[in-house]
Image (tube, grey):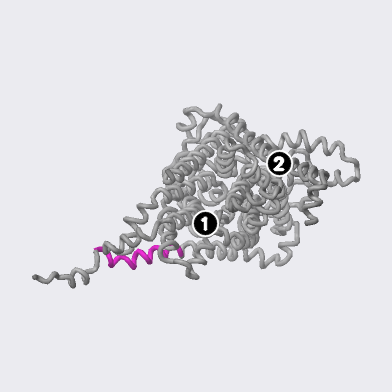
Amino acid sequence: MTSIPIDSAIRKPPKGAALDPVFRFLCLAAATALLATLSGVIVALAIGGWPALAKFGLGFFTSTTWNPVTDIYGAEGPIVGTLVTSVLALALALPVAFGIAVFLVEFAPRAVRQPVAIAVQLLAGVPSIVYGMWGLFVFAPAFAKYVQLPLMMNAEPGSLLEKLTMGVPNGANILTASIILAIMILPYMAAVLRELFLTVPPQLRESAYGIGATPLEVTWQVLLPYIRRSAIGAVMLGLGRALGETMAVTFIIGNSHNLPKSLFDSGSTIASTIANEFNEASGLHQSALIALGLILFLITFAVLASARLLLSQQRAV
Amino acid sequence: MPGSATLVRNPGRSARRKLVNGVFVFFCGVATLVALIALAAILVSLVGQGVGGLDANIFKLSTPAPGSVGGLANAIVGSIMLCALAMLIALVIGILAGTWLAEYGGDGWYARIIRFVNDVLLSAPSILIGLFVYVLLVAPFHGFSGYAGAVALGIIAIPVVTRTTEDVLKLQPTALRESGIALGAPVWTTIRKILWKASLGGIVTGGLLAFARISGETAPLLFTALNNQFFSWDMSRPMANLPVVIFNFALSAYDDSRRLAWVGAILITAAVLAAQIIARILIREPRR
């Protein structure tokens, strides 16, 4: 028997083994690039925004004077505008998205379920600029004509309604911007909520129906508690989208830096201010806009981080 | 059981439960209807306003000066080039990063940080990515450029690719990895020739979703690629692209420009929907 040279076969490293650590390093480098990007965003915004923040200090957050001519910048208008439109949009979209999700999971006829679910998911991907254009050319004029004008006409002087409906009746205002935002985040939130409802084990639902619960009771007392944590996470993700949305809002909010006085007053958001002014800005004006970006980043980061924390248990999104 | 006794003996309560439930069912139906109507209204006005202007000139001529005849050829080519370069960047970095997360990172602290960072980037406001790239690439080199635009879009696409790559790789059975090792292949050969091949469908899907995400993005291009009235292949200069052209033309006072904006919106929406539908078909395939 001749001995087989097993030794040499084993000891000879397989072809290309030397490149193993190189590949591993490349992968690690790519992963680190993500971290570098996020840190880069924070650092770039902080450095770029520093001159404005240092000059105006706290006044940057509490003043509503935004004047490129005199080079004085206070961002309360855009900050409040961002928060108000996002929260309004969320308040409008959430019940509807919830209704859609429940309808698709519990009530819809089998033949309708799949097509509507797919339509909702596809529409979540329609570019935001399309929503913005529709808002500007179709929705805002119709809203001004059929809702805003009649409300303003019928509002009694001095009443709350008059206060809420004050503004130029051109449809470009806080409320229409919020409605467009709501329509935009609606398919997204409905799709996520639907997926969450589908993660509930069928036994839970069936046993609740088995003891005679109505669909409302099943939804409210069985399904919702089961997905509560992730559902809050999904809502926060929707809020994150609304906060950072630029194009849909820029078209329709009216772009004034005042603190909005009524629902029908024009306003601005952080994103729309940056989009409108950044290319013409220089010096302190540019720094103030980057500082606005930093504020937006910190707000969305807080919202997204808590959303991810809540969603981390059920990774459905 | 007093509870069930009252339940049976109290027909009023049962009727009320039924009524409240009926209202709830009605509300859910109406909510769905309202959403479908709103979304249908958007698509109808998109098609109604845009299809009429869709002719050969759109693809042959560049964006016009106000009042003259023109098309969107420069913007279409610009958008395709920006998206192509962005996708190249995103696929290389995204696939490698996703591979690291799935194959090397495991559940370690660094992998958890990267996953969190990826999630944040996935839904970070795109306009901030535009600001970042402006500070990084536009301001230091004193000029807007197609490259800067592509980098901004790439940064937005990377997290999508990373996430889907990680997810599909994790779906691959351990036996596949063991089979590679059993053959004496180095790990990186196993990953390339076995795991990537097995997950190809999923990775392509991730790429398509990323493409759908970036092809309509406007905000990050405003301060990076800017716009260009003329036809250009040169990515080191400002570059025309559909979203920014739509933005500028929609706010223009000229009817011709607005008409072009609607046509551009239709083109973008069609591209996005096509990418999503193909991705959807690819996802479904392995289940057969």
Q: Vertical placement of A196 versus B27: above or below?
A: below
Counting from the top left corner in percent of width and height, residue B144 is at: 50, 51
Separation of residues labelled 2 and 1 (CA atoms): 48 Å
Identify the image quadrant of residue B180.
bottom left
Q: Vertical placement of A155 versus A304: above or below?
A: above
Is residue A199 or residue A70 the one in the foreground? A199
Which residue appears at 54% of the width and 59% of the height?
A: B119
The total number of labels drawn is 2
Which residue appears at 73% of the width and 58% of the height?
A: A76
Left or right of A170 in this view: B84: left
Q: Would you say residue B142 is visible in this rendering?
A: no
Please say whether residue A61 is one of the residues in the magenta stretch: no
Q: Amino acid at mark 2?
A: Val
Q: Element under label 1?
A: helix
> On the rendered image, what quadrant is the C terminus of chain A found in?
bottom right
Instruction: Name the chain letter of the residue that bears numbered label 1.
Output: B
Q: Amino acid at mark 1?
A: Val
For label 2, the residue is B25
For label 1, the residue is B133
Which residue appears at 60% of the width and 29% of the height?
A: B48
Pointer 2 local density, CA inside 10 Å: few below 14, some 14–19, many at least 20? some
Q: Which stretch did the figure color magenta?
A: A15-31
- Residue farthest to the left? A1
> On the rendered image, what quadrant is the N terminus of chain A found in?
bottom left
Report the predominant secondary structure element of the magenta stretch: helix
Counting from the top left corner in percent of width and height, residue B61 is at: 47, 32
Q: Element under label 2?
A: helix
Which residue appears at 52% of the width and 29% of the height?
A: B54
Counting from the top left corner in percent of width and height, residue A43 is at: 56, 65
Q: Nearer the viewer, mark 2 or mark 1?
A: 2
